[in-house]
Image: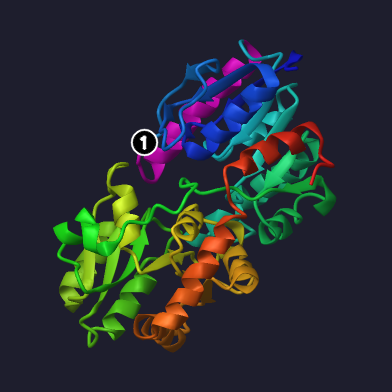
Amino acid sequence: MKIRDRKIVIINQAVNYLTIGICNEFAIRFEDVSLLTGSIHAQGEELNKKIEVKYINKWQEEHGIGKFLIYLKALCKIYFLLRTKYRKHEVFFISVPPMAYLLNLIVPNKFSMIIWDVYPDVFKITGMQEKHIIYRIWAKLNNFSFRKAFRLFTIGERMADLLSVYVAREKIIIQPIWSIFQENHKIDKRENPFVKQHKLEGKFIVQYSGNIGLTHNVEALLDVAKCMTDYPNIVFQIIGRGPRKKVLEKRVEEEDIPNCQFLPFQSDNMFPYSLSAADLGVVILDEITSKGSVPSKSYNLMSFGIPALYIATKDSELYEYCKVYKHAECFEKKEMNKIINYILSLSNNHNLYNDYAVNALKASYNFKRDNAGKIVLKYLNSKVI
């Protein structure tokens, strides 16, 4: 029997497969579910047609003041709609605009949120100190906002540690997310059109695929590539876009790093092929912020049984994953020799590589689509494990 006496609106300015999964699970249990968003990017799962969609301004790839203005415009629209159309709805906030969850301080709705990136801590990557006025104000607002939240979710123990600076640990509900891919459909390199198109036959491919922004520190991978130019069978591939991409491309050209290849984001149709091409997937977080984030690419690599190289700090969620699942290794960027030795070991030792690959696939079973249902069950009953 569906819940008929409660209405819920899910808010995310840029909806992806994770938000769609959560929305669809709410639609199983609630008669009245709405989605407030700027765009919907479906990957493998379509949004339930019974969910009402209300569009605000679209999130766009901007930087600096441009991004702030896009967020601010969305924030104003969200506030207006929560005061009018959705004034009687429960609210479940996800992701962007990143300050929108603070609206629970000024709207009467029962308000919950899932935190994937911890603000204002993320601002440290820009050099902002904790004593900065913006940092101090946002941190203080977090204290009030998180305490007031009906449900407060995050995706792992280390991120819960970070959030516990702002709210009692027992208030935080931990629930991992999941991969785009629910099955291991990795394509053999001999049949992979992506490999053929980019002439990668016979190469050991170390692949970073994702945003190339301030928090991703992709420069660290160039440092590794530069140290490994004597291994022509190893290719370092960087796929994606972002404010740092042109700078990195210029560095590769100026410093003559021939084993490094840049490619644009791949289409949804090509993505399974580009991911399948990777022998070693790379996930990088800046040391200042690595405790407060887990990129979704981590789970996609697991789902295809691809070993990973994590470049992050020892207090990160990624490091915990390595200890638990034995599917990857996590190093700080200063541990250059260890990173190089790890890559060489996997490229030269088939049995060792296979051990990591098998463990990656086993790890993926902890990050399946049914985790979306667990989020909703914990929303309805916080004691559900």
* Residue at the image position 41 percent from the left and 37 percent from the top: 43
Q: Please state which of residues 344 and 352 is positioned toward the viewer in this rendering.
A: 352
Q: Can residue 170 be seen in this view?
A: yes
Stretch of the chain drawn in magenta: 61-84
Prevailing secondary structure class for the magenta stretch in the rendered image: helix
- The residue type indicated by label 1 comes to Gln
Q: Can residue 244 be seen in this view?
A: no
- Secondary element at image label 1: loop
Q: Please state which of residues 246 and 127 is positioned toward the viewer in this rendering.
A: 246
* Residue at the image position 32 percent from the left and 56 percent from the top: 187
> Residue 153, position in %: x, y?
70, 44
Label 1 crowd (10 A; few <14 / some 14-19 / many >=20):
some
Vertical order, 365 against 115 (above or below): below
> Residue 142, position in %: x, y?
71, 44
Asked whether, in this view, residue 153 is left or right of residue 186, the answer is right
* Residue at the image position 37 percent from the left and 56 percent from the top: 186
Vertical order, 258 against 381 (above or below): below
Asked whether, in this view, residue 282 is left or right of residue 53, the answer is left
Which residue in the protein does label 1 denote?
Answer: 60
Asked whether, in this view, residue 270 is left or right of residue 120, the answer is left
